[in-house]
Every structure is written in structure tokens, then in C-alpha cells.
Image (tube, rainbow, N blue to C red):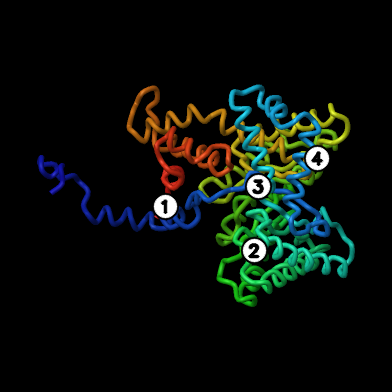
Amino acid sequence: MTAAAAIGITGTLDDGDYADADAALAATDRLLVESYPGDTGTRQPIHTVYIPGDRYRAGIAGEWGAEALQAVEAAGGLDSLAEELTGGTADAGIIASRVAAKLRSEPIEDLRIDFEDGFGDRGDEAEDAAVVAAAEALADDVAAGTAPPFAGIRFKCFEAPTRRRGIRTLDLFLTTLAGRGELPEGLILTLPKVTTVDQVRTMVTLLGRLEERLGLAPRRLGFEVQVETPQLILAADGTAPVATLLHAGEGRITGLHYGTYDYSASLGVSAAYQSMEHPAADHAKAVMQVAVAGTGVRLSDGSTNVIPTGDAEQVRAAWRLHARLVRRSLERAYYQGWDLHPGHLPSRFIASYAFFRDGLDGVATRLRNYVQQNTDGFLDEPATARALAGFLVRGVQSGAVSADELRERVGIDEPSLVALAHPRRS
């Protein structure tokens, strides 16, 4: 007996009315489960490094880390740089220490072997050879334990002039890599310069055929979409294809990456003003952000082409610019970006670690109070608790926050934190 029935209140609607509501909303229930499952809570790399296909070799991540450390040491050391880029925060010493360890152990989180703009058109023979060599090198890198946790390729786009070349590069790379054994767990494929949903559907079809013919498990292969054309933000019929393509991807799309320079140029923005913080960039990324909400697809900002080279002041200015842009992206919930040069690594990690540590005390206190049902100071709702937990998940996964700090400040472990941050629909 229900509590209402116990006091003599039975209500007006009967079981048939409830059943009618279930039937009327069955399609909505299915849509939410299948198309908006939420984030999985797995690790998202904080950056993607692009290296031209013919320059990639096993162990190159370690080389980038060593080069980054050398550049910082030549400029006064990590302590000094962390102090400058964080504005002298109390955690600057912790940040410097953790960034130093990061540059020695995992300087590149996500590496993209580039056969698109970073490689260009060198003819089929040269590209075939470079693709096979890159796939072999990645297999060697993985076997040696020196590969980044996420790695893959960017091939040429599916517009008519480069379509066959792009598909052939994708095919040769995967065929060679699969011939060396199990595909790397963190394998990522990048489809650039997408203009229509049909290009995504074609990618889905090709990946299905490759899986079947290479003996891979169904849906083993996923891919990122690079948003580099205005047609993806606003189509001729007034729709937003960037939202439609996510669902046409049949669950294979893992990320949307904003392409700073192609997108800006296509709108006529002059070179001097092409930037991740141009108003046109903010508009495109806002549309992307709304499109992916609830889908589990991750976002990545683009890059700055200002690299820390030249005299001492030019190097410091480039680091300050990059750190500011990284911080700006993080504040807007873009937790990943592109890096193009070893010198970008110190400012990427310092800015990212500072972002998570700046908010650590307040977020941890509020989440601990929520978990312990302590209403002192804030009365947070479940949605806010998810946001607080999500912030800490990223802080822990990036290395900015340690597992010990999580337990001490919140009183839970990482799996419990992930479950709180990313409840899944069922």
C-alpha cells in the first residue's frame, strides 16, 4: 500500500494513463539513452600534438619532453616560469615540480601523425611509403612503451581533390598497424575539413568495411571530426550540421576539434587577427559546445601559431600568450587543445595545472560537504555536485591533483569521483 492510499487518497489517473505516458514517450526515452548517454568519465588528453607524417619516429615524445625541459632551463628554470605564468600562486612550486615530472614521463598525451596540412601533396609514392613507415614506427613505439597514451593519424579530407588519397592513407595505415598485432588502445583517427554530414556517413561506412576485412571487432574504430569550415556550423538550409553529424556517426565520433586557421581564413579574417579568441572562433565553438552536450563527444580547441623561439623576451612573450589562451579555453570548458612545438609543452602544462589547482580548495570543500550532506556555506544540487566532481576528475586525470589529495580533501577515491561526476543513463 502506498503512503497516499494509507491516508485515503488514491488519485485520479489509473495504470492505463501511466502506460499511455510511457508509450507516448518511448521514443524520447530511447533517444536519451542512445544519443545522449553522457560522458563516460574516461581520461581525455589535455592536448594533441601534431607532427608531420615523415618526421614521426618511435621515441619522439621523449625527445619533445627533453627539448621542452632544455628550453625552460635556458630561460631560467621551471620554478621561475611557473611563478611568472601563474601570477605567483601559492602552488607555483608544486606545479613546477609536477610539470617537470610530466615532461620527463609523459610529455605528449595525444599525438597525431599528420598526413594532411602537415605533410602536403608529395605524390602517391612518397605518401604511401611515409604512411607505412609511420604505422610501423607507431607499432614499435607502443611495443617499446614510449608511445603517448593516445596516438593516431590525420589523413586528407573527403572533398573530391583529396578523397582517394585520404582514404588510401587511412587504409594503408590501419592495414599496416593491424598486421603488427592488436591495435593500440588509444588509437585515434582524425577526419579533417568536414563540410557535410555525408562525409561523416562515408567515414562510418569505410570504418565498418575495414573492421570486417581486417578482422577487428565491430565499432573498434572511432574518429574525431575537425570543424574547419563554416558550412558545418550553418548549412545552406539554415540547419547546424555539426549537431546532425554526431548522430549520423553511429557512436563512432569521439571528438570535435576546432581548426583555428582554416575556419578563420574561410570567413575572410586577415592573418594578423586569426586566433582562438576571435569572436568568430567563439561563435563556432559555442555552437559545437551545445551540439555535443550530453552526447559524450569531447571538444578540443585549436592552436596558436606563435611559438616560443627567438630572443629571451620573445620566448617569454610566447609562453605568456600560450598560457593565457590555454587558461581561456579551460575557463570556457574546452579541456583540450592543439600544440605544434616542443616549446608549447611547458606553458600548456603549467597553465592547465594552475587552472585545476586554483579551484582545488573551494571545489573540494563544497564536494566534501555535499558527499557528507553538510550544508555549511552552500546547498548544492546534484547537477552542481556533478560539475564539482567533473572538475576534480579532470584535475586528477591530468596530474594536477594527486590521488592522495583527493582522498584527504574529499574523502573518496577516483572511481567514486568518476561515478559521481558522470552518472550514465540506463
Dot 3: element: helix
Left or right, 291 with reference to 59: left
Give the residue pinned by disc 3: 105
**Label 2: few (<14), some or many (≥20) within 10 Å?**
some
Q: Earlier in the sequence, mark 2 or mark 3?
A: 3
Q: Earlier in the sequence, mark 1 or mark 4?
A: 4
Dot 4: element: loop
Q: Which mark is residue 97?
A: none
Give the residue pinned by disc 1: 425
For badge 2, the amino acid type reads Arg
Query: x, y (%) of residue 182?
Result: 61, 69
Give the residue pinned by disc 4: 305
Give the residue displayed 33% in from the left and 55% down from the top. Answer: 22
Give the residue pinned by disc 2: 201
**Label 1: few (<14), some or many (≥20) within 10 Å?**
few
For badge 1, the amino acid type reads Arg
Dot 1: element: loop
Q: CA distance from mark 4 to mark 2?
A: 32 Å
Closer to us: 232 or 331: 331
**Rendering quarter of residue 141:** bottom right
**Label 4: few (<14), some or many (≥20) within 10 Å?**
some
Q: Earlier in the sequence, mark 1 or mark 2?
A: 2
